[in-house]
Image (cartoon, rainbow, N blue to C red):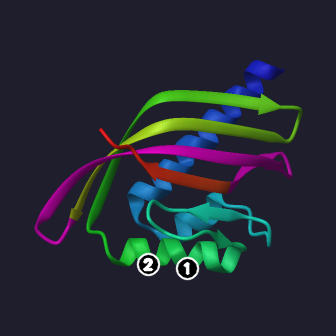
Amino acid sequence: MLKERIEEVTRANEDFYSAFESLDIMQMDGVWAHQEYVTCIHPGWSIRVGWPLVRDSWVVIFNNVFSMGFSLTELQVQVAGDDLAWVICTENITSRHGDNKQNSRVVATNLFERINEGWKIIHHHGSPLME
């Protein structure tokens, strides 16, 4: 049972990063819980609380980036009970803003809740990794 839950959360996390790379707000809508308690902290941003503000933050990002790719390292998936799980990882990001290509690393925590037999993200926190 635990192994199955870990596999489900791993897939949900992959879906989140696929939505992120797609720069498609409809795809991002599909991976998040649309609740008043969801939260998101992007690197350098203040906390966003509630689905409307969290969604708006993704719209801003998607409208200002031409491409984004992720390679995840140091991935750890944990499941607590039947309905709560989290993933911590390092996001190795390649993005393009206009003609400028940028590489960065972000340490991230993604918190998932099992809702109606599926895992939805309820919190994302990314902090820049200083090297």
Q: Out of 45 and 61, give the one closest to the viewer.
A: 45
Residue 19, given in percent of the width and then of the height, sits at 49, 57
**Residue shown at the point (86%, 52%) measured from the top left:** 116
Number of labelled discs? 2
Locate the C terminus by quadrant.
top left
Q: Quadrant of residue 79?
A: top right
Locate the N terminus by quadrant.
top right
Residue 64, given in percent of the width and then of the height, sits at 32, 76
What residue is pinned by disc 1?
Answer: 56
Q: How crowded is mark 2: few (under 14 residues within 10 Å), some or many (20 or more)?
A: few
Q: Give the range drawn in magenta.
A: 97-122
Give the answer, above or below, for where 112 lies relative to 11. below
Residue 75, given in percent of the width and then of the height, sits at 52, 29
Which amino acid type corresponds to the residue marked 1 in the rendered image? Answer: Asp
Q: Main secondary structure of the magenta part?
A: strand
Give the answer, above or below, for where 17 lies relative to 52. above
Report how far apart the C-alphas of labels 2 and 1 lie in the structure. Answer: 6 Å
- Relative placement, left or right, of 19 versus 130 is right
What residue is pinned by disc 2?
Answer: 60
Residue 103, magenta (yes or no)? yes
Q: In which quarter of the image is residue 39?
A: bottom right
Residue 107, magenta (yes or no)? yes
Which SS class for mark 2? helix
Which amino acid type corresponds to the residue marked 2 in the rendered image? Answer: Val
